[in-house]
Image (cartoon, rainbow, N blue to C red):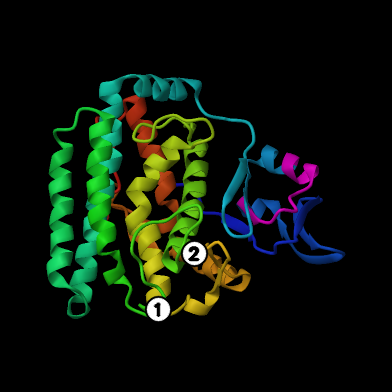
Amino acid sequence: MRKLLNTLYVTTPDAYLRLDGENVVLIAGDDVLGRLPLHNINSVVCFSFMGVSPALMNACAEKGISLCFLSPSGRFLARMVGPVHGNVLLREAQMILASNPTRAVEAASYFLSAKIYNSRWVLERSLRDHRIRMDEMTMNAAISQQKVCLNMLEGANDIGTLMGVEGVAAKAYFSVFDQMILRNEDCFHFENRSRRPPTDRINALLSLTYTLLTNEICGALESVGLDPYVGYLHQKRPGRCSLALDVLEELRAPIADRFVLSQVNLGTIVPEDFDIKENGAVYLTDDARRRYLAAWQKKKQETITHPFLKEKIPWGLVPYVQSVLFARWLRGDIDAYPPFFWK
C-alpha cells in the first residue's frame, strides 16, 4: 500500500515558491514565511498568482511532485506534472475501451452507479440521524428517486441515456440538500448548484472541495499509469480531465459533500467566513480558506474500511485505491471494476 504523503497548500496570495537545496521555500516580499523538505510532500496546491521558480518546477518534475495552480478564490488555473511513467500498454487499453461504445458505457455505468448509490446513502444517513429536523416525506421521495435511477442504469445502452439518468438523480439529490444544513440555515441556504462563479456559501464550499478532490484524483490516476484526460462518462474534451471527473462522481457525496456539510454543521465555517463580490460571486476569505484546508487535510487522515478490499485505509488513499482497481480491470486482472460503494 502506498504511503499517504502530505499536500502543501500555499494560501498567501502574494507568496512565491523557490528551491533552496532540497527544500521548497515560501517567500512574500523579502520575508521567508516557511520551508519544507521536498521529500515530505507529494503535491503542491498554490492559491497565488505569483507562481514558482523554474528550478523548483524542475525539481518537482524530477521527484514526481505535482504542482496545481488555483486563483486566490479557488478557481482552477493549471496543473503541472513531470514525465509520465505509466505502462504504455495500460494507456493503450484505456484508449481502446474509450473507442468502443459498448465498453465505454460499461465503464461509465460503474462510476454512475456508485455516485447514485452513495448519494442515496448520504440522504438516508442524514435522515436517520436528524429525522426530527427534516421533512421526512420529501427526503424519502428523494431517496426513492435514487433507487429508481439505479434500476434505470441497467437498461441504459448509450452515454446520452446514462447522462439523462444522472441528471434526474442529481436533481432529486440537490432538491433536499438544503435539509442537511443544520446550522445557520438562513445564511447557508441552498437552492441549486451554481458554478463559475458560485453564488452562495454552500456552492462556494462545494466548488472548492470538488476542485481539491479532482486534483488529488488526477495525481492518483497518473501514479498508476492512467491518463486522467481519457474518460467514459465524461467525454474527451481538450483541457478536461475526463477520467478524473468520472472517478469524482463516485466520491462526491461520501467525501466532498459530507465534508462540506460537516464543516457547516459543526460551526467550523460560519457566515462571516465569506466575501461576496459585486457580481454576486461568493468565496471563502483567506483566513477561512486556511482553516478549511487544514480540516481537509485532517479529514484525509481519518480511516475507513474499504468496501472492496475490506482493509482499513485513510480517506486520502481512496482515490489511489480506486485508480489501482480501475487499472487492474483494464488489464484484465479482475472481471469487473469495483466502484466505491460507501456505507
| Image point (36%, 19%), residue name | 99
Question: What amino acid is found at the position of numbered circle 2 in the picture?
Answer: Trp
| Image point (17%, 45%), residue name | 150
| Image point (39%, 47%), residue name | 248
Residue at mark 2: 296
Residue at mark 1: 266
Q: Provide residue 238's location: percent of width, then percent of height.
A: 52, 30
Q: Provide residue 157's location: percent of width, then percent of height.
A: 20, 28
Q: Provide residue 14's location: percent of width, then percent of height.
A: 75, 61
On residue 199, which mark appears?
none
Magenta stretch: includes residue 42:
no
* Quadrant location, the C terminus: bottom left
| Crowd around label 2: few <14 · some 14–19 · many ≥20 (10 Å) | some
Secondary structure under badge 2? helix
Magenta-highlighted residues: 43-58
**279 left or right, relative to 130:** right
Above or below — where is 313 with respect to 2? below
- Lower position in the chain sequence, tag 1 or tag 2: 1
Magenta stretch: includes residue 44:
yes
Q: Quadrant of residue 323?
A: top left
Question: What amino acid is found at the position of numbered circle 1 in the picture?
Answer: Leu
Above or below — where is 103 with respect to 194? above
